[in-house]
Image (cartoon, rainbow, N blue to C red):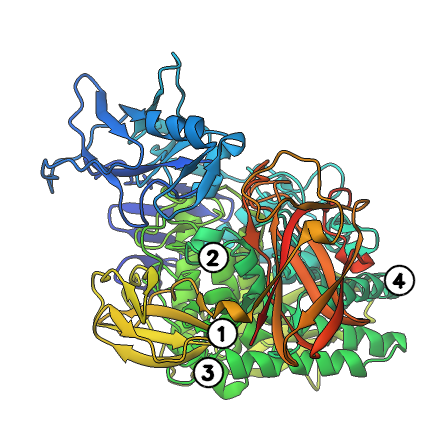
Amino acid sequence: MEPLQSSSERELYESGAFTVFGNRVKQGLYEAVALSPTSMVSNYQSPANDRHSRGISFKFSLNGKDNELPVGINHFVVLYPERGKAESPLITFGQTYTDTKPVPKDDFLEPNTAFRIRLDMRPVLQQFEDHGFYTDYAGNRVYRQDFSGVYVAGDAEPLSWDFENLPAREGAQLTDHDGNGIYEITIILNQYNPADFTANHWELEEDISKYPQFSSNLPLIDALYNLSLEEINLDTESDGTFRTGKEWEGVWTRDISYSIVLALAAIEPEISRNSLMAKVRDGRIIQDTGTGGSWPVSTDRTTWALAAWEVYAVTGDEGWLRESYEIIRKTVEEDLLVASNGQTGLFKGESSFLDWRIQSYPRWMGPVAIYISESLGTNVVHFETYQILARMGQRLGEPTERWQHLAQRIKQGINERLWQPERGFYGQFLYGNAHLVQSPRAEALGEALSVLYGVADQQQSASIVSRMPLTKFGATSIYPQIPDVPPYHNQGIWPFVQAYWNWAAAALKNEPALLHGLGALYRATALFLTNKENLVANSGDYKGTEINSDRQLWSVAGTLAMVYRIFYGMHFEPEGIRLNPVVPQAYADSRRLSNFRYRNAVLTLEISGWGTQVAEVLLDGERLQEALIPANLQGEHQVEIRLANNSFENQAFSLVANHTSLATPEVQVNQQSLEWEPVEGAVAYQVWCNGALLQEVSSNRFELQAPLDVYAEYMVAAVDAAGWPSFHSEPLSLVSHDRLLIIEAEQIVTPADLSYEGYNGKGFIELSKTANTYLSFNVEAPAAGEYLVDVHFSNGSGPVNTDNKAAIRSLYVEDTYAGPLVMPQLGKEEWSNWAFSNPLGVRLRQGSNQLHIRFMPWNENMNGAVNRAMLDFVRLIRL
């Protein structure tokens, strides 16, 4: 291959915020330079400490709940430390303190300021003493026996607004040292760590010779490829599996799966297979620990299926095909019984990878509401899972019609319920309670997957890639952002999501979108000299997100995928590797990929030119009829791909300023009207009833129309000047008392002898894998018709944000399965914290109806041993 003239100084992309050249990246004063394919330097220094405000907002928390002051109301202090120390006044829990000193615009907080916070907890402790519980501003009770600690949340590191993680966050809990009811904590603000601010140098040290060797006339791309191969080596464990990142040991289902699809199956199929099998137990896929105790609140474990197919497509291993087919089949049979909504055709559960509740959902949405929701990315994963089952079944001689039908049902549901023709991309999720509304936010991973897996048709796909909002440093996980939530998923850019977005842009042959995406990905990896887990959307900095890690596995795979999936356009099929290269003109070059081990062959692939059309493909000098490398090759082979140097279609992309939506209204009913506090910045309010837009109003009050006896759910969203609505308010359910039926649990069986509080009636019963596994009770329905059934429960088996002990039971009407009752974790050892489960729609006849709550085999959670909840009462609502 004849070398081209040096392309090192060629400008590949200029965004206004940064510029990518053939050998370097420049962003203001910072520059990263590829000295060679195995050496880079960067003078990047995080600017996070330079402009730290003297104004600090914070509030306190009992048991990791946002329960001191109403949402959006915080304590506020302006700090001028003396000798490196500052102290708050003594603040009484529940009473707002606001410092009246002005916050200077050009005078910033000194590094390593020790800030002592003092809290008067005596009113709370007195309520514990007098009543056995504390009543917060919203009327919710915290029982003395459930009280586990008081914590501080805030807007300045190391503080965080992530209330649910406060109990596990080091340095967040206040202590009463002398037992006088005054709690204190000292935190270090504007922490300065020299390791975060020194210039960096990367020199290849690991042996990467077993991997495909890539070379071009663009030193930057070559060096980042080699850096990523080295990080693959470093992320490989001694047991033959991949770890999740430098800071994250072990295999995580979604992380490994998305990584395998991007690049790892292509270069490490055996380690990929080992890693997948590490996430299988009892013949089914493991859903990692997560919100409310994992599955079925989170249901994206079927990402495993996408990766399993990729391993088969790369290896052609028929034994793996059969083994993985059976694992996927067993898994989806459970999902169909526990997480499928027959009315919408969609699956319930948390957005794939967006598994930190406050980071992508309104604050009112707890684990039950997240289980009820139906999200874009997770449903695209389920769609492709059934497509894969059909493909596998066809090759194995198994029936495929059922899987094909289910896949089409999901696709139809996504397009009917989530597509937004006026915006040109899909909405984020459906949410609510018995009735669902759409969140119109864009969700970058789900949008990209919908293009890549064919949920979106060609016209929709082109619209998504050209119209989904992108910011200067890349594709944010969601758009617009959520107010008062620190960067992580919200206000964050994730390189692996960017990689999938770039892949989708390449599939649509959208050159401007692809150039922006490649620039965004290469900028971050070059300046930071590692594949970071995430970065701050507004600054492009790695410092300032809630958690971050070097050499995050799926970020590493994302950088490698730019070579395999885009520049070479590799698509693995059982019959071979199909090549659909997409090379922007700015990247025009000759490039070589040698030592590419594919089944029984070792390939050297050379590509020249630019564009999207393959002019010619030669295999060992012989022209191929199509750009497909056969799977049956053996030994060493030479592949030459010549692109046609064709122009891309003139497609646009939507590069916009980052945007944050308005705060979520908090709605109350006052006699015949809905009322809420005005939301700053709102130009209108949308009032929704039973999942449909009822009216748009300009005031913060809405008159309800009589009669109000029939069940209805109301939600309100605040609309800003750009036309973006806030999250909808928590569903407010209105129904007359004569339409309610309450069946106390202690009327069904003997109540539990446990000292929990806050229950209704005279007691409650325990549900476990051995206690009360089969409950039967009679319901006298006053009229035939549709009813909602839910249960009032508590589950203190674990915290709200993690673990794997969600309780699940099956509801039957007579002998007909009505659906699952999901009772997630509500707080570690908070057994006096009661909530309602998901509602199930049932049809009852007038008079006697026999209902059953059973523990069935498909109700096994991810823990296996603990599947426990307290049942207070069963509620029926006549619709």
* Residue with the most extreme top position: 178
Q: Nearer the viewer, residue 385 or 764?
A: 764
Q: CA distance from mark 1 to mark 4?
A: 54 Å
Q: Tell me the mark number nearer the camera, choosing from 1 and 4.
A: 1
Residue 184: image x %, image y %? 34, 22
Q: Which residue is mark 4?
A: 319
Q: CA distance from mark 1 to mark 3?
A: 42 Å
Q: Which residue is mark 1?
A: 711
Q: Tell me the mark number nearer the camera, choosing from 1 and 3.
A: 1
Q: Which mark is residue 365?
A: 2
In primary-sequence order, the first of circles 3 and 4 is 4
Residue 73: image x %, image y %? 26, 46
Q: Amino acid at mark 4?
A: Gly
Q: Amino acid at mark 2?
A: Met
Q: Which residue is mark 3?
A: 462
Q: Amino acid at mark 3?
A: Ala
Q: Tell me the mark number nearer the camera, choosing from 2 and 4.
A: 2
- Quadrant where the N terminus sits is bottom right
**Label 2 close to label 4 by CB (< 8 Å):** no
Q: Which mark is residue 298?
A: none
Left or right relative to 60: residue 620: right
Secondary structure category for the residue under label 4? helix
Give the total number of marks visible in the rendering: 4
Secondary structure category for the residue under label 1? loop
Q: Amino acid at mark 1?
A: Tyr
* Residue at image location 44% in from the left, 60% down from the top: 477
Left or right relative to 850: residue 784: left
Secondary structure category for the residue under label 3? helix
In primary-sequence order, the first of circles 1 and 3 is 3
Q: Tell me the mark number nearer the camera, choosing from 2 and 3.
A: 2
In primary-sequence order, the first of circles 1 and 4 is 4
**Label 1 close to label 4 by CB (< 8 Å):** no
